[in-house]
Amino acid sequence: MGNQLKLNKRKKNYFVHQSSYVDKDVKIGKGTKIWHFSHVMKGAKVGRNCKIGQNVVIGPDVVIGNNVKIQNNVSVHRGVVLEDHVFCGPSCVFTNVFNPRSEIPRMKEIRKTVVGEGATIGANATIICGHIVGKYAFIGAGSVVTKDVGDYVLVCGNPARVRGHMCKCGNKIVLRNKKWKCSDCDIEYKISSGRNRKCSLKK
Ligand SMILES: CC(C)(COP(=O)(O)OP(=O)(O)OC[C@H]1O[C@@H](n2cnc3c(N)ncnc32)[C@H](O)[C@@H]1OP(=O)(O)O)[C@@H](O)C(=O)NCCC(=O)NCCS
Ligand SMILES: [Zn+2]
């Protein structure tokens, strides 16, 4: 009975496809699924109910929140933090050294990238390291992010420029009857005026 209990406790409550590698000292939350040919490196922490696609690398000591979706061909390097509910589109690129040179070791100069809760990074986008992608920000497909992106802000292009604001549900926030509202689900937001317009939920 005692032995049976120990066995049950050791039973994994997450899924790793047999073609993938999970190094030692890795924590993976309940309900997370890791698909084909991926590698989770030493010391990484992956939250609950995450979906990690094919050919994904989670670097050493990387911290990933709950319900994060990482599509195929993404490397999440040391120095990158993905908060809860982040969506990383296929083949998006994180960087961690700002000015790499093959002849000069720069692993001590890693610049941190934080992707805030609920943010979306479109397919094939590149995030230059040392920046914060705000919560529920939306990075259009193929964009190159060279600056911080505010909460709920939509950026597109190379270099990525502000194109508007996106609701939590992934639709545009529009001004109607002097109110900033989602064009789809009707959630209301506050957007400040001025150069660095801050967006937040209207309570
Ligand atoms: C950004 C996005 C959500 C569209 O937003 P939108 O504001 O509704 O965009 P629209 O289609 O109305 O286009 C508005 C303008 O932005 C441009 N635009 C849209 N997406 C763009 C992008 N990713 N990069 C550069 N420009 C873009 C359009 O060409 C258009 O330009 P114009 O005003 O000169 O004609 C969509 O284009 C996108 O990139 N989605 C991400 C898809 C993805 O990566 N999914 C991953 C999982 S499969
Ligand atoms: Zn909405």
Image (spheres, helix red, strand yellow):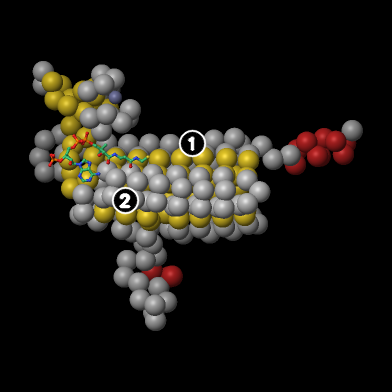
Q: Report the front residue among 4 and 184.
A: 184
Instruction: Tell which residue pokes out farthest to the right in this image.
Output: 1
User: Does residue 77 appear left or right of residue 149 in this picture?
Assistant: right
Q: Are marks 2 and 1 in contact (CB under 8 Å)?
A: no
Query: Residue at 60% across / 47% down in the picture?
Result: 27
Answer few, some or many: residues within 10 Å of disc 1's Cα (few below 14, many 20 plus, some between 14 and 19): many
Tell me the CA gap for discs 2 and 1: 21 Å
**Residue 185 sits in quarter:** top left
Query: Residue at 87% across / 39% down in the picture?
Result: 3
**Residue 47 sits in quarter:** top right
Instruction: Tell me the SS state at disc 2.
Output: loop
Whether the residue under disc 2 has CB within 8 Å of ligand 1: yes
Amino acid at the residue labelled 2: Ala
Task: Report the disc number at residue 67.
Answer: 1
Which quadrant would the N terminus be assigned to in this image? top right
User: What residue is shown with label 2?
Assistant: 125
Quadrant where ligand 2 appears? top left
The spot of residue 179 in percent (x, y) is 15, 21
Amino acid at the residue labelled 1: Asn
Which quadrant would the C terminus be assigned to in this image? top left
Query: Residue at 23% across / 40% down in the picture?
Result: 154
The spot of residue 17 in percent (x, y) is 63, 46
